[in-house]
Image (spheres, rainbow, N blue to C red):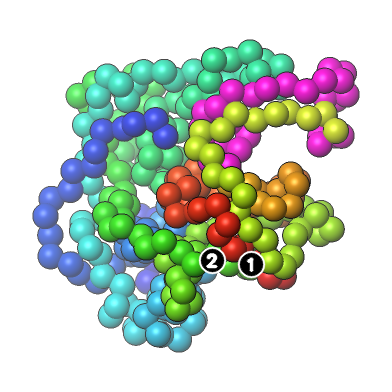
Amino acid sequence: MEDPGASAGVGEAVAPAAEPRVAATWLEVQVALAQRGFSSGSIDGTPGPQTRAALRAFQESEALGLTGEWDEATRARLTLLRTPLAEVTLREEDLAGLSPLGATWLEKSQQPSLAHETLLERIAERFRAHPRLLQRINPAFDWPRAVPGARVTVPDVESRRRLPSPAHLHIRLAERVLQARDARGAIVFHCPVSIARDVAKRPVGELRVTVVIPDPDYTFKPETFPESEEGRRLGRRLMIPPGPNNPVGVAWIGLDRPGYGLHGTPSPEQVGRTESHGCFRLANWDARTLLQLAWVGLPVRVEP
């Protein structure tokens, strides 16, 4: 059954109280999964491969068949912990600090921070939603002319439970997923990741976390981007300031292989692809969650 309709601080989502009930659309399935720590990437209300991967992770946690389907057994267990949609009342600070992103590496290096460009982008990241979904569930909302006090409907995706510290991270390259697991092997957290375009640059085996950095800056290295005409012309490195539109997003979790790490990205809709230069990219919201779970020395197992 498919859905028929199918950061910087943002005001808290307020949802009406409701008794737990079975998810009834694909949008509600994605929200119910997010409320439990199973990320399906950018919430869009459609049953794509990332949603099915999150369903399989949930099914494993519930000792169900790993079908990736919204079958009868899964429906019986996947209840909404709260209503699927909530309402946000915008504050002045929610609209402050929006800034156009420089078009070149040099322009980016000269900005004080790489903030969100638009309110739509900020709200989408805060509530883990695809921008088109927000536009669809707010058909009359004027995003460019929004003012404090305006109300926006958003997915109610907050977990509201403290995730336990994991014993290790498990990345499966073929499925492009990352899972944090406890000492018993149970899934603590699940999310999609992007992996290296070049197979030779995909690390496989046992790694460890060496550093955990929130809101990192980024060093642009021309040698890392040989395809960049600007990089060849500049011939020097540039320091790119922090912010959600930084190339590594809002988190850097370094690994014990030089130059490799897990990090956020300003392009959450592209997560799950084979596109990176070697690192593992997560949506900024998943990177923030992982930032709270990771610790120096945490084992990271990467499988083909």
Quadrant for residue 252, please give it: top right
Residue in the picture at 52% in, 28% down: 243
Q: Residue under circle 2?
A: 168
Q: In this picture, is 152 found above or below 261?
A: above
- Residue type at the position of mark 1: Arg
On the image, the x and y values in percent for residue 193 come to 59, 56
Q: In this picture, is 111 found above or below 178?
A: above
| Label located before the other in sequence (1 or 2) | 2
Q: Which residues are magenta?
A: 224-252
In what element is the residue under mark 1? Answer: strand
- Could you say which is closer to the camera, residue 303 or residue 150? 303
Task: Check if mark 1's residue and mark 2's residue have beta carbons within 8 Å.
Answer: yes
Q: Residue under circle 1?
A: 301
Q: In this picture, is 220 found above or below 177?
A: above
Q: Is residue 175 magenta?
A: no
- Could you say which is closer to the camera, residue 119 or residue 284? 284
Quadrant for residue 169, please give it: bottom right
